[in-house]
Image (cartoon, rainbow, N blue to C red):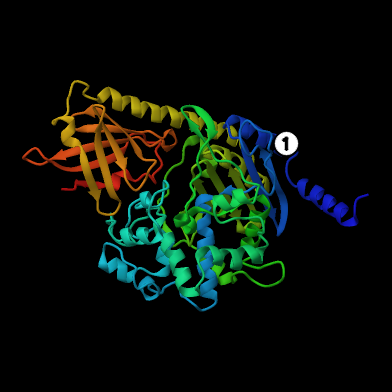
Amino acid sequence: MRSVTAIVLMICSFVNAQQMPKDFDANVEKVLKTFNVPGVAVAIVKDGKVVLAKGYGVKTIGTNDRVDSKTNFSIASNTKAFVGTSLGILVDEGKIKWNDRVVDHLPWFQLSDPYVTKEMRVIDLLVHRSGLSLGAGDLLIWPTNTYNQKDVVKRFKNIPLSTSFRSTYAYDNILYLIAGELIEAVTGMTWDTFVRTRIYQRLGMNNSALTFAEAVRNGNSATPHGEINGIVRPVAASDSAKTNPAATVNTNAEDIAKWMICQLDSGKLSDGTTLVTPATVRTLWSVVTPLPVSKVAKELAPLQPNFAGYGAGFSLRDYRGKKLVWHTGGLSGFVSLVAMIPELRAGVAVFTNQEESGALYSIGWRVLDQYLNANYDWISAYKTIKDRTDSTNNAAEAKSAVSRDSLSTPSLPLAKYAGKYNDVWYGDVRIDLKDGKLFMQMLPTPSLGGYMEHYQYNTFIVRWSDPEMRADAFATFSMNPDGTIELIKMKAVSPATDFSFDFHDLLLKPVK
């Protein structure tokens, strides 16, 4: 016999479920099939209540281990909202101000430009306008490498700025690590401890983790998947303590629903206290760095914004005439979406265990459309976009192959290219002659090693031995007048390569 509590919960679940279209589950299953995604978790909140917290599909392809409402996914850059909120808590407590200089809390903090070092404020750590280029320094933190947190901080100061301070938006991860260091300096608690005690415990996010390894130990975690040579299969997770403040929150549908409800209730908790004040929530959700508004693809016409910008760990724009507070995230094998419309007190989170953003958006926008009395075939739209993008990327690679001068030869005997090279911020790279072929090994990053295939003239393509890297790169040698090698510059071969493989920022010079 069921308890009265169980019956009440069942009725509440039934009532809440009725707020979604009857075909919602079928639609999600269609998304999984269309985009070849093994599993997904969906959380929907409205007016302070959980409408849906549910898993679909499987944790690992080829198994019957189903995703449920407590299955943890790596949410990657959706972690950044937790950093902004953490700093907001400290602002509310009077321990810091948004406009404090970073060096006043972290005297060791240093960028390559002394003026920017001196003038960078706490808010600047969060809003992607430092002058660093897109993803600058990401090779210091992933793929998994031999550097520890102190190594990253030490090398970070050597990364050159590409634009003037506060002039240009360029998404970065590494300054969020500095934000984590600032939290520890002010509170005496590591980033992990602060989030666990000051956010997770207060919200009741009891099944969430702060690393992928912790999520696995807890026993209910989705397996990351990627498409390798046309086949979706499990891949190694990106999991490093160095990246925690930028990307490694692991959470689930039930817990992220609590997070969204708190945010949409201006920081209020169910016990009547506050996580952060309404004033701080407004700061988190206010545009600090404007983004240019470009025209979207015709298939995505309903997404055409009138404004776009970045706040303190949140992306901001409008959607169908309403302000949208949102963010996406991507790590090896996972992508995530959290999107909220404050005016409607509605929010949706979608987590998948395959790197296919079309699946996220097809579900997420459909949910928000339900509350905006709108209807659109997002599955067809994103499938068209995916097919066109794949075709464009393949065409770009084919064009590169055709334009290659296949009759050209290297200027030097292969042995002359071998040796150790150094980039001032990344570290050492070694090139060896093995069995008549050049082999490049990026010494701090074991997974980035591979044979170099001659492309043309003094340019080679590095084919990484680990197929999960999916980031083959051009390596071009520049010569001194005397025929010796001056430096190597690198660039990803495919336009589909993730920007965090920031080979293009390397200037590898021979080590004598």
Quarter of the image for residue 196 reads bottom right
**As drawn, 360 above or below 87:** above
Extreme bottom residue here?
A: 94
Question: Quick one: 321 or 404, which is closer to the camera?
Answer: 404
Q: Position of residue 455 (x, y in %)?
A: 25, 28
Q: Is residue 267 left or right of residue 329?
A: right
Question: Quick one: 36 or 3, which is closer to the camera?
Answer: 3
Extreme left residue here?
A: 482
**As drawn, 481 above or below 196:** above
Question: Quick one: 499 or 425, which is closer to the camera?
Answer: 425
Residue corresponding to mark 1 = 23
Extreme top residue here?
A: 407
Q: Amino acid at mark 1?
A: Asp
Picture residue at 65% right of the left edge, 37% below the top: 58
Q: Is residue 110 left or right of residue 125?
A: left
Within 10 Å of the Cα at label 1, are there few (<14), some (14-19), or many (20+) other Cα atoms?
few
Picture residue at 42% right of the left edge, 47% below the top: 144
Numbered marks: total: 1
Picture residue at 93% right of the left edge, 49% below the top: 1
Q: For numbered disc 1, what is the local secondary structure?
A: loop
